Image (cartoon, helix red, strand yellow):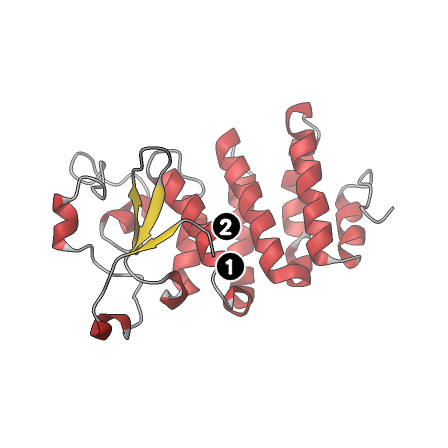
Amino acid sequence: MSSGIQIKTKSSTQKSKTCSAESQPKPSAKLNPKTIDPFRAYSQPSSAFAATYARGGIPCRLVHGSVKHKLQWECPPETVPFDPLLLTLAEGLRETKHPYTFVSKEGFKQLLLVEGAAEKVIPLLPRLVPVLKAALAHADDEVFGRGLDALVQLSAVVGPSLNDYLKLLLTNLLKRLMDKKYREEVTVALQKLEHCGGRATVAIIKSKIPTYCSIYS
């Protein structure tokens, strides 16, 4: 799977262990300028996500590339407990500082790409959806964009299971839909939600956004 995931080489004993979301960074990481957290040494964490990242509670780090950035995982993402890591990454979508913005967005995306993600994510929906709602309600345009991308990615994984929670998110989408700057972006997202959620999704969307035109029309 070409998701841009990088994994450190481990011994056979280490590979047999399930990675904990509280994994501590290796001492060697302190000597590697590519994995140094620029905020750790110079400032106090400004949020819960930043604090979790600083203490090594998120088992991946930003690696600066010559062309683009990548995430380097301390262990295969499929071995990481989704609870609480996926929720923590979703919280991080509201961050506005680098590297937290990249780590939260890319980490969330890559966790959803692992095999068997759906069965791990669906039980978390009651707690995950309110976190995404907060990102969609954020005044910062980039935060809203990350929240919208995450919602579409989530829908592609859980499908119709998201329908029970969709009404909680539509009010925020409607507000952006009324702004010409976001109309096309939000419309495309709604169409993708409908595509993944099935025909039942149309009635749910129309209950909050009566002007929505179904992809099946």
- The quadrant holding residue 21 is bottom left
- The quadrant holding residue 38 is top left
The amino acid pointed to by label 2 is Val
Foreground: 151 or 1? 1
The amino acid pointed to by label 1 is Arg
Q: Is residue 50 visible?
A: yes
Kindly identify which residue carries mark 2.
131
What element does badge 1 sit on?
helix
Q: Residue at x 64, y 50 (%)?
A: 168
Residue 203 at x, y percent in the picture: 81, 53
**How crowded is the residue under tag 2: few (<14 C-alpha within 10 Å), some, or many (20+)?**
many
Taking the image as shown, residue 146 lies to the left or right of residue 195, namely left
Residue 136 at x, y percent in the picture: 56, 40
Q: Residue at x 58, y 59 (%)?
A: 157
What element does badge 2 sit on?
helix
Check contact, mark 1 vs mark 2: CB within 8 A. yes
Taking the image as shown, residue 51 lies to the left or right of residue 169, namely left
The disc at residue 199 is none
Residue 139 at x, y percent in the picture: 52, 31
The disc at residue 127 is 1
**How crowded is the residue under tag 1: few (<14 C-alpha within 10 Å), some, or many (20+)?**
few
